Amino acid sequence: MREIPFLDMKSPYLELQAELDSAWARVMRSGWYILGEEVQAFEQEFARYVGAEYCVGVGNGLEALHLILRAYDIGPGDEVIVPSNTYIATWLAVSYAGATLVPVEPVERTYNLDPERIEAALTPRTKAILVVHLYGQTAEMDAICAVARKHGLKVIEDAAQAHGARYWGKMAGNLGDAAGWSFYPGKNLGALGDGGAVTTNDPALAERIRTLRNYGSKVKYYNLEKGFNSRLDELQAALLRVKLPHLDEWNARRARIAAFYLESLRETGLLLPHVPEGMTPCWHLFVVRAPQRDALQAHLKAQGIGTMIHYPVPPHLQAAYRELGLPAGSFPVSEAIHREVLSLPMGPHLSMEDAARVVEAVKAFFTPLPAREGVREKEYQR
Ligand SMILES: *Cc1c(COP(=O)(O)O)cnc(C)c1O
């Protein structure tokens, strides 16, 4: 039986091999490897793609978020709203800046920050809302930005899973004051190593991040402040320039798989992704939910089908955040989500034939056992 990987990491290179190899060779021969023409060109091209005025290439997605907070002078004594369910990098960026995390629960059906819960979490020390477009679908940005405007808060997007996602036609990464991007290889726009960027329409912020990413220096060996070393390198920028023009087409392939899953898995016991009006996800992940998640994952594994759990443990229950003293039960919505979500194979190089095999395997898990029937959407409406 042929294995179906959760994400095919080899085919993206093979599809663009000639172009990627020549971009690589061009940089190798150039004799210039840090902050040169490739990074500058990618910054312009990615800013244009997102529709933002500025883009600054940085070392990775975590640093992109961290540097945004630093550049806004958000630090000790300040509070930042974060989702209670996200990848830990969102939280770590706030910790790096020395600010205080204020987790807020998501809307259960979309997994994204619940705008209606934000106001109750605000204090005079709140400086920003760090919103995540989880799994590739934007949060409810109109409502979130309205709360932010009312209270004078910055809106920072964690767009690490949202390359090409749209909200009422407008690109993720151009929906708040600034956005942090990751080009980790598994993202929709992935480098062949680490990489990240900040997009913004704020010229002062862009300028400060350009300085902060490079030791706090604008002119070599003259340091204006204690900066960091967090630069997108020339090789990765050159490779990203090859991949960027293919992003929309690759996202369209993901959308075709998603449409097929949504249609074919309707009659199973799974809770499927919910796409509210105005949202155009980039389908970074296709996340389903079932109380029997672990058994389903084991069943699919036995059929040679790879899946992942995004994520098995919420940040507040990680050993890394023991110091916060937030026991199990502190964020029940997030905890229930973490217990039941499963990500099915998804990517631009997943064939329809393999997607059909995934569907058949999921159906086989649910149909033969009458005891499992009755697990329907209504059970989730608690
Ligand atoms: C991947 C990811 C990050 C971090 O990106 P890195 O480039 O790995 O540092 C941050 N937030 C979210 C939601 C992510 O998925």
Image (cartoon, grey):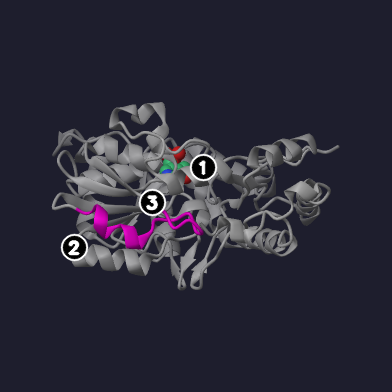
N-terminal-most mark, 1 or 3 = 3
Q: In percent of the image, x 55 and y 51: which residue is there?
A: 188
Any magenta on residue 85? no
What's the CA distance linking mark 1 and mark 2?
31 Å
Percent of width and height locating residue 109: 51, 59
At numbered mark 2, what does the secondary structure look like: helix, strand or loop? helix
Q: Residue furthest right?
A: 1
**Magenta residues, as a range?**
106-122
Which quarter of the figure has residue 43? bottom left
Percent of width and height locating residue 193: 51, 36
Rendered-image quarter of ligand 1: top left
User: Magenta part mainly helix, strand or loop?
Assistant: loop
Question: Which tag is nearer the camera, tag 2 or tag 3?
Answer: 3
Q: In percent of the image, x 72 and y 65: which residue is there?
A: 263
Which residue type does callout 2 highlight?
A: His
Q: Which mark is residue 338?
A: 1
| Direction from residue 6 to residue 134 in the image, left or right | left
Q: In percent of the image, x 58 and y 46: which residue is there?
A: 341
Q: Which residue is mark 2?
A: 151
At numbered mark 1, what does the secondary structure look like: helix, strand or loop? helix
At numbered mark 3, what does the secondary structure look like: helix, strand or loop? loop
**CB of mark 2 within 8 Å of CB of mark 3?**
no
Say which of 163 and 12 sits in front: 163
- Tell me if residue 153 can be seen: yes
